[in-house]
Image: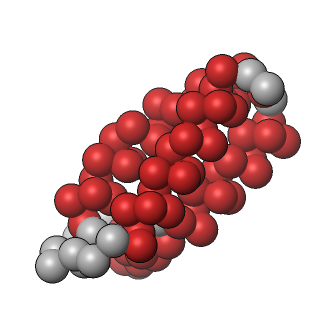
């Protein structure tokens, strides 16, 4: 197993453990930290292992951080619906 996959699996386990802990803030501070660490890690996984393995890791990360992904998709849709220059 490559170094990037080992680190990605540790990230996935950490994210799952954080998700199981109770939180007053609905886990948003933890999600920001996970995204900050996860994006460069995802790039490293794609670079070291290729597209298929990178896409699998991306899918796993999106299943854990599904609320930030939903809000990002909503934001993209709202930006696409706006008229530019009006």
Comparing 16 with 86, the one in front is: 16
Image coordinates of residue 37 in percent, x first then y, are: 39, 37
Horizontally, is 55 left or right of 37 in the view? right
Viewer can see residue 85: no
The residue at the far left in this view is: 24
For the N terminus, the quadrant is: top right
Horizontally, is 53 left or right of 69 in the view? right
How was the colour assigned to the protein in this rendering?
A: secondary structure
Q: Residue at x 64, y 51 (%)?
A: 58
Q: Residue at x 84, y 42 (%)?
A: 52
Viewer can see residue 33: yes
Q: Residue at x 59, y 68 (%)?
A: 63
For the C terminus, the quadrant is: bottom left
Image coordinates of residue 70 in percent, x first then y, are: 46, 75
Image: 46 above or below 80: above
- Count how many numbered circles sit on residues in the image: 0
Horizontally, is 12 left or right of 68 in the view? right
Q: Residue at x 28, y 57 (%)?
A: 30
Image: 34 above or below 44: below
Horizontally, is 42 left or right of 38 in the view? right
The residue at the far right in this view is: 52
Comparing 37 with 71, the one in front is: 37
Image coordinates of residue 22 in percent, x first then y, are: 27, 77
Image coordinates of residue 15 in percent, x first then y, are: 45, 56
Comparing 20 with 30, the one in front is: 20
């Amino acid at each position: 197993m490559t170094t990037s996959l080992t680190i990605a699996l540790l990230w996935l386990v950490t994210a799952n453990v954080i998700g199981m802990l109770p939180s007053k803030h609905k886990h948003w501070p933890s999600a920001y930290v996970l995204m900050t660490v996860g994006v460069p890690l995802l790039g490293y996984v794609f670079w070291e292992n290729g597209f298929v393995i990178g896409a699998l890791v991306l899918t796993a990360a999106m299943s854990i951080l599904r609320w930030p992904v939903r809000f990002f998709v909503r934001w993209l849709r709202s930006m696409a619906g706006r008229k530019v220059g009006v």
